[in-house]
Every structure is written in C-alpha cells, then in structure tokens.
Image: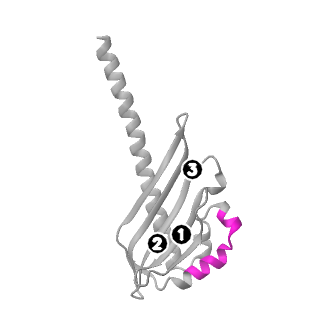
Amino acid sequence: MNKIFLSILALSFVLSLSGCNDIQSVNTRKASHDQAKEILRCLDEDDVEGLKSLFCEKVASSHDLDKEIAEAMDFYEGKSVSFGNIVVSGGDSMRDGEFVDIHIEYSIDNLETDEDMQYTIVTASYLVYKENPRCIGMTYMKIIDADTETEFQIGEHVW
C-alpha cells in the first residue's frame, strides 16, 4: 500500500511540474503574439512612442531610439495587410523554484503591406531577467525587406 501511495504521489508531482512548464510555455507564446501585434500597430500608425515603450531600459538609455525608430518607419513602407506565421523560440532558467530568466525571440514571417512590400520582423525580449532587470523588454527589432534582404535594426541584443 505504501509503494502505491508513494508512486501516485511521485507521479502527481511530476505531472504538476510539467503542467507548470506548459502554462509558462503558453504565457510565453501569448506574450510573443501580443507584442507582435503591438509592433505592427505601431508601425502601421507611425506610433514612435508606442514602439519606444516596448524596448528595455538598458537599450533605451544607450540608443537614440527616437532616431532609430523614425528611420525604421521610413524603411517600412505601407500598412500591414497580412502576415504568415509568428515563429516563437526562447528559453528560461529557474533557481530555487523561481524563474530567473525568461526570454523570447520570434519572427513575423511573410508580412505584406498595402504598398506591395514584403517583410520579416525579428525581435528578442526578456520577460524576466533577475540578473539585470534593466534588460526586461524588447532588446532589438530587425525589419528585413524580403525582396532585397536589406535590413534595418533598432536596439541590440543585450545581456
């Protein structure tokens, strides 16, 4: 009887841990998709302040984001009419049962605008970074012209 009880307890523990990871994975994907939609809104509406607010404090203090974003908006022609997949990757680290690092990278593929342009947008963000909280937020965003493969980057990858 004791072995059965311990087996059930161990199995419950393992399942509960995997359930937490599934919830974290879903939250990371949702954060990526929400951020992607906000980036597109900002580009479509020429909302410099909105896009600027997505960047982490470390990048905001070391870059002229107003200038970089204005140049990126000049590079990006039109308003988005459709896009393909949002491809998400990233990772996380735990210490003593607490997340100390959750980072995401994603791309918005096959983005088409009403100016007959096609782009890919690539970004990286920290959702949690206990070692340097100034890095929480988007660290860089790259807009790539699909036809010419010319790219424009705002910010940088930071640690």
Front position in the image: 114 or 71: 71
Q: Secondary structure at mark 3?
A: strand
Q: Give the residue drawn at x 40%, y 51%.
A: 26
Q: Give the residue drawn at x 46%, y 68%.
A: 37
Q: Is residue 87 above or below residue 82?
A: above
Q: Secondary structure at mark 1?
A: strand
The span from disc 3 to disc 2 (Cα, nearest Å) is 22 Å
Query: Which quadrant of the rendered structure holds the N terminus?
Result: top left
4 relative position to 26: left or right: left
Marks 1/2 in contact by CB < 8 Å: the verdict is: yes
Q: Give the residue drawn at x 50%, y 68%.
A: 38
Pointer 2 residue? 121
Pointer 1 residue? 141
Pointer 3 residue? 128
Please state the horizontal and vertical placement of residue 27, each as a whole percent of the image: 44, 51
Q: Magenta residues: mostly which secondary structure?
A: helix
